[in-house]
Image: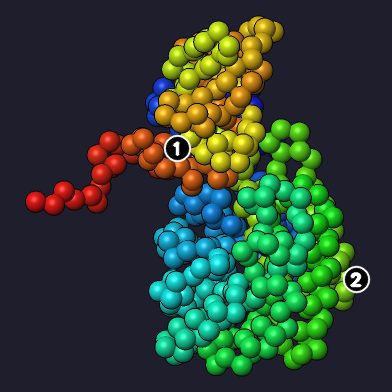
Amino acid sequence: MNHFQRAADGTLHAEGVPLTRIADEVGTPTYIYSRATLERHFRVFDEAWAGQPHLVCYAMKALSNLTVLNLLAKLGAGFDIVSAGELARVLKAGGDASKVVFSGVGKRRDEMAAALQAGIKCFNVESEAELDHLDEVARAHGAKAPVSLRINPDVDPQTHPYISTGLSKNKFGIPQTRARAAYARAGELEGLDVVGLDYHIGSQLAQVEPMVEACRRVLGLMTQLFEDGHAIEHLDVGGGLGITYRDEAPPSPAEYAATLKAELRAAGYQHLTILTEPGRVIVGNAGVMLMKVLLTKDNGVKRFAIVDAAMNDNIRPALYDAYQGLEPVAPVATSQRQVVDVVGPVCESGDFFARDRDLPPLDEGDLLVMRSSGAYGFVMASNYNSRPRPAEVLVDGDSYTVVRTRETIEDLWRGELIPE
């Protein structure tokens, strides 16, 4: 469920705010997030784990606006980070460092040091070499780094290959065949404190079966680790639960959690603390991107609607050939439809949001929204073609706040120097 719905007059609203108002007052393109949707999605996910000790660590790579992070922190969220910059954002937003897990295959030593000094909950270590690096940093700071080893269970997540992370050919994690040896090595290092076990098989997961298979394999390893004398305190089951972009029917958070809790009970680990790392499922359908039609064009072969947003503003269609819903903001007054490519002004044939999309007739000046833009939208935006990045807006009931101002032309060269 989300709070982007049409009012009685047919105009698309975010909660109680007509999107036409935001277009008039803030401009386009603009990312718009619904506070009610963000809060509801987090609570639904968190409540699904009731009865199991757990911590929901929001995967902030999906959307890292400070206001959104502050909102989630107030709801009790922890955070899954992958860089020192993300850690700094969590702390700036009022997040609790003791609820932070640090993932990623290439943590720099200065990033490790910053996380140690902040007092994070755990490092999700992804290689044997990283164990040695982290041990060196921790001992240099007179500290012990809490670690969880990310295990690659070699399970096909049945998702897009770019967001698959649990196969042996992927760069992520330590192969399960080397896991016991890696844990033995971690236990020998003076600067490390082994506290957890971690896995994550991919993003936009739409089926339960791969999740169950991965969980079973890792729980089997968990038993072996306890036998080896490791005092494992938590199991991090990763994130990746999918959302509906078009006609996908991923498991609900309740179904997802119930399935994994059943596996935990069957293995005798119902009292183990579970960490989860949801991102897209929290913010994906809590945001839209608002854009305006600049002009229409018919070259005799195809009809195009050229909009003021571009691939630099939302790269998902170009990068993943991803489908995202598009619809006019204004009431649709006709049953007529047109097949059209919705494209941006960037000088790339890959600069498109939709190809051969069946839409109501579009005219210059019409407002469009791209649905499901809360996750991996603004965070992947760039200044390609020297285009300022969009504004971000948070709607709360019948009011809204600009939570990131639109970049200016001068912002494009901030930090650049012309040598004399």
The amino acid sitting under disc 1 is: Asn
Q: CA distance from mark 2 to mark 1?
A: 47 Å
Residue 358 position within the rendered picture, expressed as x and y whole percent measured from the top left: 66, 18
Q: Quadrant of the N terminus?
A: top right
Residue 392, how many percent across, how many down?
45, 39
Seen in the picture, residue 38 relative to 257 is either above or below; the reply is above
Q: Measuring 86% from the left and 66% from the top, which residue is drawn there?
A: 263
Q: Residue at x 19, y 50 (%)?
A: 417
* Position above or below: 108 against 63: below
Q: Is residue 339 visible?
A: yes
Please provide percent x and percent y for residue 64.
49, 52
Quarter-of-image position of residue 36: top right
Task: Tell me the residue that label 1 is attached to.
Answer: 312
- Specify whether 273 is left or right of 338: right
Mark 2 or mark 1, earlier in chain: 2
Q: Secondary structure at mark 1?
A: loop
Q: Which residue is the site of mark 2?
A: 266
For the point 84% across and 68% down, the residue is 216
In this orientation, does residue 286 appear?
no
Residue at image point 64% right, 52% down: 163
The amino acid on which the numbered mark 2 sits, given as a three-letter code, is Ala
155 and 38: which is toward the camera? 155
Crowding at dot 1, Cα within 10 Å, few <14 / some 14-19 / many 20+, comes out as many
Q: In the shown orientation, is residue 385 left or right of residue 340?
A: left
